[in-house]
Structure formats: C-alpha cells, structure tokens
Image: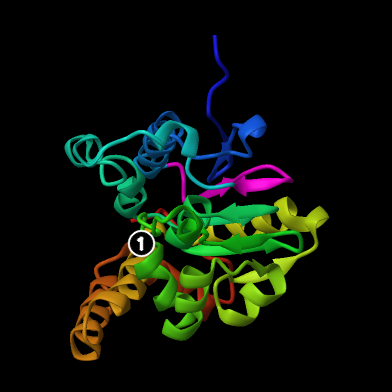
C-alpha cells in the first residue's frame, strides 16, 4: 500500500497538514491535492480547531505540479476534468486561518499554494519561483492573480516572465511572506503563532479573514462597508462581550467561540 500523500495531526486547537511525497519533493499531483482538500475541509468543519498549518519537508514545501503526470494531457483532458478548479481551489472554501510553513523549494504550484494561505512563515532556506514559462506554460493555480496582489505588478511580471527565483530575504522584502525565521525555528515559530491565533475567538478570526480577503476583491467603498457590517456583527457575539469585560476586569478572557 502506498504511503498517504499527506499526514494530519492535531495539537490542541491547531490542525497540522504535512505534505508527504518526499521522494518527489512534494510535487503536487491529483492524489495529494484531493487529500489536502479533504483534510482542509475536515479541519475547517471541526469546532475544536481554530487554525490550520500546512507544511512540507526541510528540502521542499512543494516543488510544483507533477509534470510527469501532465506531459501528455490534452485541452479536453484538463477542461472536462476541471483541472485545478476541481481540487486545488478547495483552500478558498476554508474560513479558518491557514498558515504555510515553508522551507526549501516552493516552486510553481508550491508557490501558488503558499500564496493561497493567509500567513506564510518562511525558513531562511526557502526559495520561491513561478518557473512555468520554462515549459511554455503559465502559472494557473492563482499565481498570476495572487502574486501581483502580494508584491505588485512589476515584480510579479519579473517573476512570471523570467522565472526569477526569490530567496527568503527577498520574498520578505517584497511582501510575499509574513516573516522569515532560521530553519531550526520554523516549526516552533509556526506552531507558537498557530496556537496564539487559535486561542482567539473563532468567529472573530473568521470575520477578519473574510474582511481582509474582501480588500482584494472589492472597491474601497464596498470593502469599508463589508468591514463595518462585520464589526457591527461582533456586538451579537458572546465572545466580544466577554473580551471587552475581561479587558475591563483586567483578566484573561474565556472564549466560547460563539
């Protein structure tokens, strides 16, 4: 029996998904993306989970799509099967915070998977690239859309048109990642952050994620209105009242995630 392409564990209110194709540097094939999508939805639907971490190996977060599988596909193969849309986009359904812990290569689809996460923690060894142009292809899992939103049009064009690779320091300076840490501290730092986030009120976390994502998809006027309604809705939340009263009482709040 072949080994599972992902491994999932729970640490308190944090769900950790590890990509698990080490011999292929975690190249993303249908089996892995199907399993990843299912694990994400399972954790998103688990009321005991407040944050999700996706990680790879020391050598590679994910070295891109599995080209050996794709090489002979036709247009009708990918169109009729809903290639990418069918399983790569599952992460967009996840309402809870998703953190990518990236060491080593994050190439092509691996870079796009990281971009689809809410926070990206990069080890100093991390390298990011969208090299599809070398294959006469283009980034098709959101890369041409999310990358300009993250780092701006000029730098995104440079990466997509020249296959330029960014090291962790460059990725941090450009705004592609949230923070950079030594390789030995990647998992500890990521888990510490995930535990911190998962300890906050889950409905508030979900409202913040929705509001920040709306900033990419709406005008400022519409985004402000969305944010304002999300804020007003907090006053219907037991956690918000608990948080404010705990602040006034100078005590730690006890959230019920309601």
Quadrant in which the N terminus appears:
top right
Number of disc labels: 1
As drawn, the residue found furthest toward the top would be: 1
Closer to the camera in the image, 102 or 206:
102
Tell me the magenta residue range. 48-62
Closer to the camera in the image, 65 or 120:
65
Q: Is residue 103 left or right of residue 231?
A: right
Residue 134 lies, with reference to residue 52, above or below; the image says below
Q: Is residue 98 visible to us here?
A: no
**Whole-percent x, y for residue 162 in the image:** 53, 71
Q: How is the image coloured?
A: rainbow
Q: Residue at x 34, y 40 (%)?
A: 45
In the picture, residue 20 is in which quadrant?
top right
**Whole-percent x, y for residue 75 in the image:** 22, 42
Q: Residue at x 52, y 57 (%)?
A: 111
Residue on which disc 1 sits: 206
Q: Under tag 1, what secondary structure? A: helix
Quadrant in which the C terminus appears:
bottom left
| Mark 1, other Cα within 10 Å: few <14 / some 14–19 / many ≥20 | some
In magenta segment, residue 18: no
Q: Is residue 39 left or right of residue 14?
A: left
As drawn, the residue found furthest toward the bottom would be: 221
**Whole-percent x, y for residue 118 in the image:** 46, 63
In magenta segment, residue 58: yes
Q: Is residue 14 visible to us here?
A: yes
Residue 244 lies, with reference to residue 45, above or below; the image says below
Q: Is residue 194 left or right of residue 104?
A: left
**Whole-percent x, y for residue 182 in the image:** 80, 62
Q: Residue at x 45, y 41 (%)?
A: 48
């Amino acid at each position: 029996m072949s080994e599972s392409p992902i491994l999932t564990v729970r640490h308190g209110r944090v769900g950790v998904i590890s990509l698990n194709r080490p011999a292929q540097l975690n190249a993303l094939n249908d089996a892995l993306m199907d399993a990843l999508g299912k694990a994400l939805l399972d954790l998103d639907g688990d009321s005991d989970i407040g944050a999700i971490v996706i990680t790879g190996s020391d050598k590679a977060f994910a070295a891109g799509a599995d080209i050996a599988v794709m090489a002979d596909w036709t247009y009708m193969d990918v169109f009729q099967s809903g290639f990418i849309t069918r399983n790569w986009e599952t992460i967009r359904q996840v309402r809870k915070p998703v953190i990518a812990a990236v060491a080593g290569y994050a190439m092509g689809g691996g870079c796009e998977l990281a971009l689809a996460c809410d926070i990206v923690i990069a080890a100093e060894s991390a390298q990011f690239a969208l090299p599809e142009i070398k294959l006469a292809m283009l980034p098709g899992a959101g890369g041409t859309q999310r990358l300009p939103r993250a780092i701006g049009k000029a730098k995104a064009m440079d990466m997509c048109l020249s296959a330029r690779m960014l090291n962790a320091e460059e990725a941090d300076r450009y705004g592609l990642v949230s923070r950079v840490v030594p390789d030995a501290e990647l998992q500890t730092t990521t888990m510490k952050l995930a535990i911190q986030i998962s300890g906050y009120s889950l409905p508030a976390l979900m409202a913040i994620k929705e509001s920040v994502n709306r900033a990419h998809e709406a005008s400022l006027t519409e985004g402000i209105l969305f944010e304002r309604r999300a804020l007003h809705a907090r006053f219907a939340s037991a956690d918000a009242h608990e948080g404010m009263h705990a602040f006034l009482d100078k005590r730690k709040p006890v959230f019920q995630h309601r």
